[in-house]
Amino acid sequence: MADAEVRTATVADAAEIARIQLDTWRSAYSELLPPGVLEELAQDTTERQWSEAVAESATTVLLATEGSWTVGFCVGGTAPAGETAAADGSVPEDANHTGLVSTLLVEPRWGRRGHGGRLLGTLAQRLREAGNIRGIAWIPEADEASMAFYRGVGWEPDGTVRTLDAGGRPLRELRVTGSLELRFE
């Protein structure tokens, strides 16, 4: 494998981040999301949204590269209060010290080469440096690959679910959680 690394994204990376998101969603989520939702996603709109997200200082956006190729990205930060509530609505004691992995995508053709682990490991380190001790992420219930990935680092579903409107079709997501001291299997 060529040199692989993780670095902080810049606004100049927005086009590559948008490309990876669109390509990955169209490949990995074609059965989870209605075709109309995926067809409506436009490169220029997605690129503009990522440019704004990268420029926002409260969010960490990381890029995985292999050689000269950009192969994946990860986004996270301290979790908003509404994201940390337990399934019964109670607020856990560590709510103010919980990080949220809002997106972690690696292009399928670059999968199984350690990029996801490097991205999550780097984000977990940054979240710990910001005072967080636990992490959470939302995963589509039917996304077995992502569930296996998170379980591989010691994160498990915590019983909290949400249902999003995905173009008129419900998309049920499970919240996974675990220590930011990751263990890789």
Image (cartoon, rainbow, N blue to C red):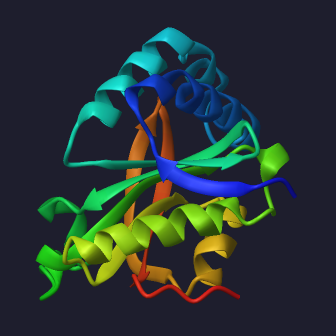
Image side of residue 130 versus residue 109, left or right: left
The quarter of the picture where the N terminus appears is: bottom right
Q: Is residue 68 above or below residue 52?
A: below
- Where is residue 182? Give x, y as percent: 50, 85
Looking at the rendering, which quadrant does residue 83 occupy? bottom left
- Decide which of 122, 90 is in the foreground and name it: 122
Q: Is residue 170 above or below residue 163?
A: above
- Say which residue appears at 44% left-offset and 13% top-offset: 45
The quarter of the picture where the C terminus appears is: bottom right
- Where is residue 149? Give x, y as percent: 66, 72
Can residue 90 be seen here? yes
- Where is residue 52? Give x, y as percent: 29, 26
Image side of residue 42 versus residue 178, left or right: right
- Say which residue appears at 23% left-offset and 63% top-offset: 79
Image side of residue 168 versus residue 109, left or right: left
Q: Is residue 47 above or below residue 16?
A: above
- Say which residue appears at 49% left-offset and 10% top-offset: 44
- Decide which of 14, 165 is in the foreground and name it: 14
Image side of residue 149 versus residue 82, left or right: right
Q: Is residue 105 above or below residue 81?
A: above
Q: How many marks?
A: 0
Can residue 160 be seen here? no
- Where is residue 166? Give x, y as percent: 48, 35
- Say which residue appears at 84% left-offset and 44% top-offset: 109
